[in-house]
Amino acid sequence: MKVHVTVLPKPSVLDPQGAAAAEAIRHLGLEGVGRVRIGKMIELELPDTTPEDEIHRISRDLLSNPVIEDYSISKQ
Amino acid sequence: MKFAVIRFPGSNCDQDCVLALNALQGATADYVWHKDTSLGDADAVVVPGGFSYGDYLRCGAIARFSPIMQAVQEFASAGGTVLGICNGFQILCETGLLPGALVRNKGLHFVCKHQHLRVESTDSRFTSAAQDGQVLNIPIAHGEGCYFADDATLADLRASDRILLRYCDSQGDTTAAANPNGSRDHIAGICNEGRNVFGLMPHPERACDPQLGPTDGLVIFKSLLNSHILQPA
């Protein structure tokens, strides 16, 4: 199976990339854009039998840093 | 006093650290490869700057799982002296030896310049040779040096006098303009609860040779040497 792990900076963490992108979007004429946050998406190929808690363990301990980031998992 | 300077693939300040330390009377320094599992008979460990593992995933995220880091964690838990500089600071945060994390500079740019720092506490083996409030001039060079910790962690750091260095201007004032990367509370360097692990973004090893400019970085290494001599055997 393919698993997508999405990692985003926590709302409390300064995200200057997101702020710069939001400014550029406004500049391109799209009104009303709110907060923009930039993170990353990691695609994993895993055996179908991989336990859910193992995916969480890897996402929490390696793929994200819980001090500054939140993650979510979606199986494709 | 024997220093072990850890070398990861992508470290690039390891040679500067070894050179600066070996030039000091009473200090010897040698490299330890990241795949080693022992620190030998080192009295102190330096985790140097650079781009370990190409900064892939997050700065320091992969170096944290290098074999030698297990030995560094055990060394630190036993009270051993660990100094993390720049990428080394990021690695120590990722490892959990220091609280918080270092994120992208507020201005998004990589910042490489001399920077004034104020010594906030001399109550540590890393800053004991400095004066309280002393202003140091030491180079910084980083793209991800913005220190972040939540409010509770910051309050704890302040209450326990663990913020050892803050960014300031030449007069020693911590103004917003003198904060090069948006770090919370102008933090440039912090220590752990046991005061034996210190991480800082500036590069003291680049400020040790008068031919290269100010030598304010020496105060960190001299503090370590003094503390080592004073230590009961």
Image (cartoon, coloured by chain):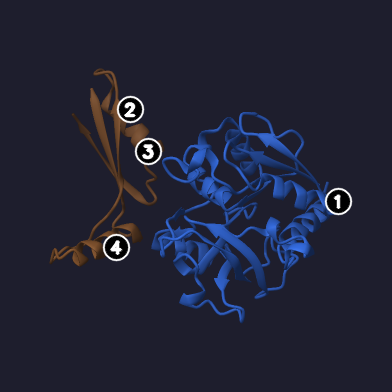
Chain colours: A brown, B blue
Output the chain of dot 4. A
Real-space Cα distance between discs 3 and 1? 42 Å
Q: Nearer the viewer, mark 3 or mark 2?
A: 3
Disc 1 residue type? Gly
Real-space Cα distance between discs 4 and 1? 49 Å
Instruction: From the image, tell me which residue sits under label 4.
Output: A19
Q: Earlier in the sequence, mark 3 or mark 2?
A: 2
- Residue B212, horizontal then vertical, whole percent: 73, 63
Counting every numbered tag in the picture gives 4
Q: Quadrant of residue B217?
A: bottom right
| Pointers 1 and 2 within a single chain | no
Disc 4 residue type? Ala
Disc 3 residue type? Leu
Instruction: From the image, tell me which residue sits under label 2.
Output: A54
| Pointers 3 and 2 within a single chain | yes
- Residue A20, horizontal then vertical, whole percent: 30, 62
Mark carried by residue B26:
1
Whether residue A15 is visible here, answered yes or no, is no
- Residue B157, horizontal then vertical, whole percent: 51, 62
Residue at 25%, 29% (x, y): give it: A3
Q: Quadrant of residue A58?
A: top left
